[in-house]
Image (spheres, rainbow, N blue to C red):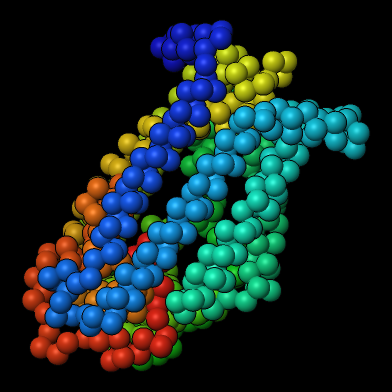
Amino acid sequence: MDILQRLGRFLDRPGFPWKRLIVGFSAGQYLFESFLSLRQYKVLQQKKPPKALKGEVSQEVFDKSQAYGRAKAKFGFVSSLYDQIQNYGIIYYDLLPKLWALTGVWLVRYVPEKYAGEIVHTLIFFFTYNIITTVLNLPTAYYGTFVLEEKYGFNKSTVKLWIMDMLKGQALMVLFGAPLLSGFLAIIQKTGNQFFYYLWLFSIVVQLFAITIYPIFILPLFNKLSPLEEGKLKTSVEALARKLKFPLSELYVIDGSKRSAHSNAYFYGLPWKKHIVIYDTLIEKSESEEVVAVLAHELGHWSLGHTTKLLGIAQFHMFYIFALFSVFINNRSLYQSFGFHKEFPIIIGFILFSDALSPMDTVVKLLMNILSRTFEFQADEFAVKLGYSTDLAKSLIKLQIQNLSTMDADWMYSSYHFSHPILPERLGALGWYGSEKKVDGKAIDDEKPLKSSDREL
């Protein structure tokens, strides 16, 4: 597009302070997110549960939840500062051009000349950079798993398993990352200024490929999937799927308890062939009706077209990122600001472009969370219309207690960070007015708590 090329020429201004601008973006985002975390920390110091939960959780459970939330917040303050220091150090000491030059020496010394080129150089640079950052992040990763989560009873992993998972992840990155990154670079090199069209189509093919191979080849490396046993739960889930005309192929149980007490349920697959996966911890801790209620919520996302809409938005987002990248890919002033005066590697351009895009990504994140929370309310309403209002409310309360999840949140913090409404909001939307019997930690066996996943149920 001519407009993108003109914009690219306009932004390529010799001497423009790109480094100061990007460092300023990074510092501004860090300060803003720290401000939000401080607001949330004040909420985590409250002594009484929200009114909507006073009849549902004991004071003891609420105190534990608040303590867990404060511990995670303190860890978040330290880890985010550590990340910020790393990022500033990489920029201030020009580590990117130095690492590019070092890997260039390795390329000349150890790689046959016929294979020496930007693609192979980029692969060596990328995997070296990844190893360095992985090592630098080991302390916080270890603390989060074996200190913080261990203290509150959520960690089920061992150091050996943790290390093996990390090594498997690195091996998979090499196995799949090398051809994908090579394809990414080759498309840009061969298709000229219109590369973003072809790059976008390539990304769609990669996503379809990932959906197909992940459950077959990758997931079994980390977890075991077993067919759900015959019984009330399987019969009820299959009946729900038939009722909604959900193309259910298989029902699986995953051994999530192998690493964590966290609980979840999800579905995956192609449009005409879906699979449902239920964590063993969810089955262990819930009544069959409650598990089905959770799945009614999840299938509500499918029935209401949420997954299709989010997929469409993701494709649009990917396209506009690649299109904007075409504006910056030949921006010599951007490269030179970060110490690249003679070589202008594509991968470096993409890294710097991603940093420059961070303010826009913050806005996108906020808007996507607003949309996601709307979808969650709609999926809850879908489950209510199917007759699962009470079971869904009980399941959400039970998981909240077992997870020691945050029971209240600052509105600014939750708007920015949360993709799901907080529990009091969801119970209000469900029309839940409480049960006659108060729920306490012991009544639902809090000796085996659950840890909420990245995507809450």
Q: Is residue 84 above or below residue 74?
A: above
Give the camera-side residue of 427 and 194: 427
What residue lies at 16% left-to-right and 63% top-to-bottom? 425
Q: Quick check: can you spot residue 407?
A: yes
Relative to 274, is 115 on the left or the right? right
**Splitting the image into 4 quarters, where does residue 188 fall?**
top right
Q: Position of residue 165 (x, y in %)?
A: 64, 66
Give the camera-side residue of 275 and 91: 91
What residue lies at 54% left-to-right and 46% top-to-bottom? 83
- Quadrant (top left/top right/bottom left/bottom right) for the N terminus: top left
Q: Is residue 25 above or below residue 17?
A: below
Q: Is residue 304 above or below residue 71?
A: above
What residue lies at 50% left-to-right and 47% top-to-bottom? 81
What residue lies at 39% left-to-right and 40% top-to-bottom? 31
Q: Position of residue 300 (x, y in %)?
A: 24, 63
**Splitting the image into 4 quarters, where does residue 98 fall?**
top right
- Quadrant (top left/top right/bottom left/bottom right) for the C terminus: bottom left
Q: Position of residue 241 (x, y in %)?
A: 29, 73
Relative to 218, is 316 on the left or the right? left
Q: Position of residue 346 (x, y in %)?
A: 63, 26
Tally the marks: 0
Relative to 188, is 26 on the left or the right? left
Give the camera-side residue of 105 and 236: 105
Give the camera-side residue of 413 and 372: 413
Q: Quick check: can you spot residue 250?
A: no
